[in-house]
Image (tube, rainbow, N blue to C red):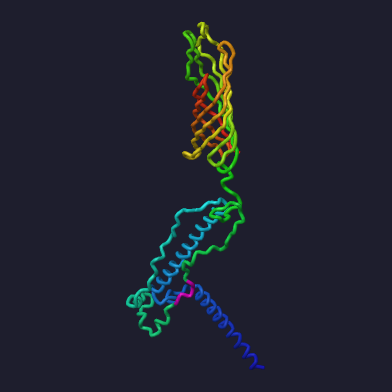
């Protein structure tokens, strides 16, 4: 009984020592994992580390070049599919990968390590401890898209369908219709002298033209009509010397031909030609009618507010026998 009690007292005296030892080992373990391993645990010297990272950076540059080229080709494919266009922009890789990294020579690689305090050649296993690249070094591979798109479209280029629509049929290009309404000022330039006292001269008046038809790309063809009205100038006289106070009205229909061309931004230029028939109603002072061959020509500028509406400012020549005139026009053009 006495021996049992002695053993229990011995255990009780050793128990605090056991707990203190355990706590010390635990504390040393936490400090061990918190410490950072030195560079020499992974690389034999600084040159090996530098060379390894140079290889990795070189591979990353090559991979970025590859991705950049893929993005360029993807943009080109996008333009072909959705717009029927070809992206002919120049492409350059952002990094130069022609110079490969070179491992330092043996004479410079095995230099004294300032951390370890001894030469790397002092150990017979130094060469065997030089680390090898365990991660793959990326290099640019052949250009290859991640997917291929075949368009079943209707627009063809080089006998191959590249879009589901023909881009020239929308906006200002392609086949469509047009309507042009242009009020203007008619300025006559011809004076008629018939007899000793007769003089017929006309003052500027109002004119309006309307044309419509089909437009294909930059060319247009359709039908047009013009109406103009001019009163006699106060100096006008009949054969008896009496003043003329009446007017002349002319109505013409014609075949409208035109061509438009781009200048700067939304500003276009245009030229037009019209051939047709005219009829004039004249009071001097008796009423009389004249008719015959009609011709007109136009030139001007058009500012496109959108693909549908344009403001037109131009000059038109109006040919007829009684009141030939120059017209200054300002109107609107519509495309649909």
Could you tell me which quadrant the C terminus lies in? top right
Residue 270 versus residue 240: which sits nearer the camera?
A: 240
- Is residue 299 shown above or below 52? above
Residue for point 50% across, 26% down: 317
Q: Quadrant of residue 149?
A: bottom right
Q: Residue 158: where, in percent of width, then height?
A: 53, 55
Could you tell me which quadrant the N terminus lies in? bottom right
- Is residue 186 shown above or below 41? above
Q: Is residue 12 magenta?
A: no
Residue for point 50% across, 53% down: 87
Q: Residue 13: where, in percent of width, then height?
A: 58, 85
Residue for point 56% across, 33% down: 333
Residue for point 60% across, 40% down: 176
Q: Residue 294: where, in percent of width, then height?
A: 54, 26
Q: Which residues are magenta?
A: 132-136
Q: Is residue 135 magenta?
A: yes
Q: Main secondary structure of the magenta part?
A: loop
């Amino acid at each position: 009984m006495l021996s049992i009690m002695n053993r229990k007292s011995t255990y009780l005296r050793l128990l605090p020592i056991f707990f203190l030892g355990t706590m010390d080992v635990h504390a040393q373990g936490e400090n061990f994992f918190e410490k950072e391993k030195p560079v020499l645990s992974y690389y034999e010297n600084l040159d090996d580390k530098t060379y390894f990272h140079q290889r990795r950076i070189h591979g990353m540059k090559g991979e970025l070049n590859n991705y950049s080229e893929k993005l360029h080709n993807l943009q080109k494919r996008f333009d072909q599919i959705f717009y029927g266009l070809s992206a002919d922009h120049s492409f350059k890789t952002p990094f130069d990968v022609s110079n490969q990294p070179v491992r330092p020579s043996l004479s410079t690689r095995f230099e004294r390590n300032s951390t370890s305090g001894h030469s790397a050649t002092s150990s017979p296993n130094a060469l065997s401890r030089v680390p090898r690249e365990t991660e793959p070094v990326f290099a640019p591979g052949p250009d290859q898209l991640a997917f291929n798109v075949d368009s079943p479209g209707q627009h063809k280029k080089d006998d191959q369908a590249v879009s589901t629509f023909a881009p020239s049929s929308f906006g200002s290009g392609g086949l469509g219709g047009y309507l042009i309404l242009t009020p203007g000022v008619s300025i006559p330039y011809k004076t008629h002298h018939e007899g000793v006292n007769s003089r017929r001269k006309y003052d500027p008046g109002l004119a309006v033209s309307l044309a419509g038809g089909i437009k294909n790309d930059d060319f247009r063809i359709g039908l047009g009509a013009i109406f103009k009205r001019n009163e006699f100038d106060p100096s006008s006289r009949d054969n008896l010397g009496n003043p003329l106070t009446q007017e002349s009205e002319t109505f013409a229909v014609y075949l409208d031909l035109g061509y438009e061309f781009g200048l700067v931004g939304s500003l276009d230029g245009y030229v037009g030609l019209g051939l047709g028939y005219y009829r004039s109603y004249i009071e001097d002072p008796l009423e009389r009618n004249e008719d015959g061959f009609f011709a007109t020509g136009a030139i001007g500028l058009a500012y496109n507010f959108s693909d549908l509406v344009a403001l037109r400012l131009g000059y038109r020549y109006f040919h007829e026998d009684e009141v030939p005139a120059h017209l200054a026009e300002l109107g609107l053009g519509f495309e649909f």
